[in-house]
Amino acid sequence: MDKYYYLVAQLPFLEFGKESYISRQEFLEEAKRWLNEKEFSLLSQADINNLSLEEGYPEVLREYIEFERELRQKLASLRKALKKGQDYSLPEILKSLGKEDTPLEIEKYLLQLRWRFIEEKEVGHYFDLSFLILYFLKIQILERLFTFNKEKGKVKFNLLCKVNLLG
């Protein structure tokens, strides 16, 4: 148990939208020094893009995966309804989504939804493996948030529009 105290005490505070955070690689390198092989394996499997539920995953990781699956299902239903021109009643969790104007703002909103879910799960977890898993998921959200580049996105968007018009 002491190892968690030492590891967590070294970690910087993470705040959504703030770029001063530890990288995924730095975090994993430090965690590997403090955790046993099984704990490190569970921690390193936590991935915001992995939606498969494996046997033996800690409860907080299972809950995050279920949340992510549900969120993506609701988004898929919304997109399908919009594509068919059907009415779709937005679930409560997505009510503010319609207020966002650009795909970038929508993506940031969705990342913030994920962040809030993780923060709710952190309650009661301060110096344990669950805290470290949630912290690792937050690092991944921040990395995704700060990889957005408006100019590159505009170029890619224009390229996709040309392809759709030609094809």
Image (spheres, rainbow, N blue to C red):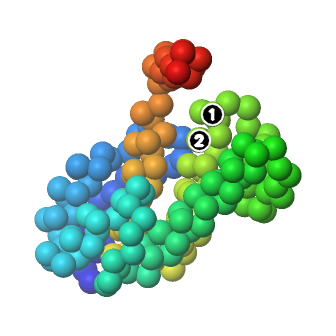
- List the residue tagged with mark 2: 107
Q: Is residue 131 visible?
A: no
Q: Secondary structure at mark 2?
A: helix
- List the residue tagged with mark 1: 103
Q: Residue at x 47, y 31 (%)?
A: 148
Given the image, on which type of amino acid does mark 2 rest?
A: Glu
Is mark 2 in CB contact (under 8 Å) with mark 1? yes
Q: Residue at x 31, y 84 (%)?
A: 56
Vertical position of residue 122 compared to residue 112: above or below: below
Task: Please tell me how crowded label 2 is: few (under 14), some (14-19), or many (20+) other residues with Cα within 10 Å.
Answer: some
Q: Residue at x 32, y 83 (%)?
A: 55
The image position of residue 114, as x and y in percent, is 56, 57
Q: Is residue 98 visible?
A: yes
Q: Tell me the tag on residue 62.
A: none
The image position of residue 41, as x and y in percent, is 21, 71
The image position of residue 147, as x and y in percent, is 42, 33
Q: Secondary structure at mark 1?
A: helix
Q: Residue at x 40, y 42 (%)?
A: 143
Q: Nearer the viewer, residue 87 or 152?
A: 87
Q: Nearer the viewer, residue 38 or 85?
A: 85
Vertical position of residue 10 compared to residue 26: above or below: below
Q: Name the image quarter holding residue 8.
A: bottom left
